[in-house]
Amino acid sequence: MKWIRFTLDTHTEAVDILSYKLDEIGVEGIEIEDNMPLSEEDKKKMFVDILPDPVDNDGSAKVHFYMEPENCNPEKIMLQVQDIFQEIKEFCEIGKGTISLSETEDKDWMNNWKAFFKPFRAAENIVIKPTWEEYEKEHNKDILIEIDPGIAFGTGSHETTKLCIQALDKYVKEGDSILDVGCGSGILSIAALKLGAKHATAIDIDEVAVKVAAENMAVNKISPSQYTLYDGDLITNSYMKVRAGFNHDIVVANILADVIVPLTDIIRPHLKKGGLYITSGIIDTKEEEVRRALEKNGFEILAVEHMKEWCCFIAK
């Protein structure tokens, strides 16, 4: 199916009022392109260690919306939009104030990526399988983890996740208690539990990720008695620090170096004496910064594993 794409060339000052006026003529949703700098809140929600280079903000913006050809009159809509521009230009900067049309295919952007997510071996005896793929075990001792990450971070295919899974494969013992900080899809908690851990407490600042993690626990037939899930910020929320529990055998955090550094300042009480702190999500340019944070907080670094430009610290 084809869609008509309407593109308004305008100014950031006009975006809010345009959204309101377009809603009045039956436009149900818009897409905005601009060069506005990211807020601190936006940056905290981004799962990247290196942000894109800032672009000069000249105030220009594009507003897109889509309509089905059989349910709209393009000429009428273009005239309505031009009327809106004329109406609002007395109150705000409208930039170019033009509208153009193009045609786009109806693609399932939310699910097309699934075609590229295939079963793979994340560690010697651990295989990650998307829920929609068939897979037959190659070896009886293989541990199979089924994942549907939804819109949460964590298919297991990223180097940082593989590094954490391989560390868990090496260090998890029967009956261990695990704290998974920044759990995403829950893949590390699931791996630890399937490796013999008794209980996993998993935390993420994104409540959607926590919901996805619960769904993946169920898919992998993990009993609810074996895990506890929370959404919240362990670093800044005192109540969450209590909920996270203390004296865990292993704390695993696959996040970002800029989060791992402050986390390292407060994580010690959550580890039992001699417990392991496994951290990844660290790009190699941040390796020394994380090393200094670990040493400052009295951690003994047992190993540093690398995969491509990423590294993982195992410390106690």
Image (tube, rainbow, N blue to C red):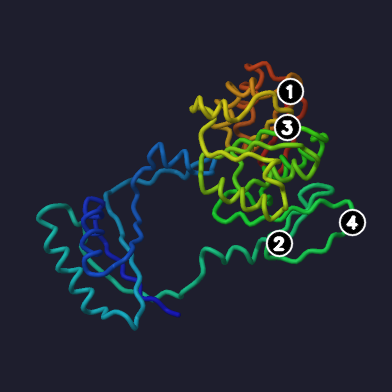
Q: Which residue is mark 2?
A: 118
Residue reaching furthest right? Answer: 140
Label 4's element?
loop
Amino acid found under the numbered disc labelled 2: Lys
Give how far apart the Cα atoms at labels 1 and 2 are: 35 Å
Q: Which residue is mark 1?
A: 316
The label shown at residue 177 is 3
| Disc nearer the start of the sequence (2/3) | 2
| Disc nearer the start of the sequence (2/4) | 2
Q: Is residue 11 above or below residue 49?
A: below
Amino acid found under the numbered disc labelled 3: Ser
The label shown at residue 139 is 4
Q: Nearer the viewer, mark 1 or mark 3?
A: 3
Image marks 1 and 4: residues in contact by CB distance under 8 Å: no
Give how far apart the Cα atoms at labels 1 and 3 are: 15 Å
Amino acid found under the numbered disc labelled 4: His
Give how far apart the Cα atoms at labels 1 and 4 are: 33 Å
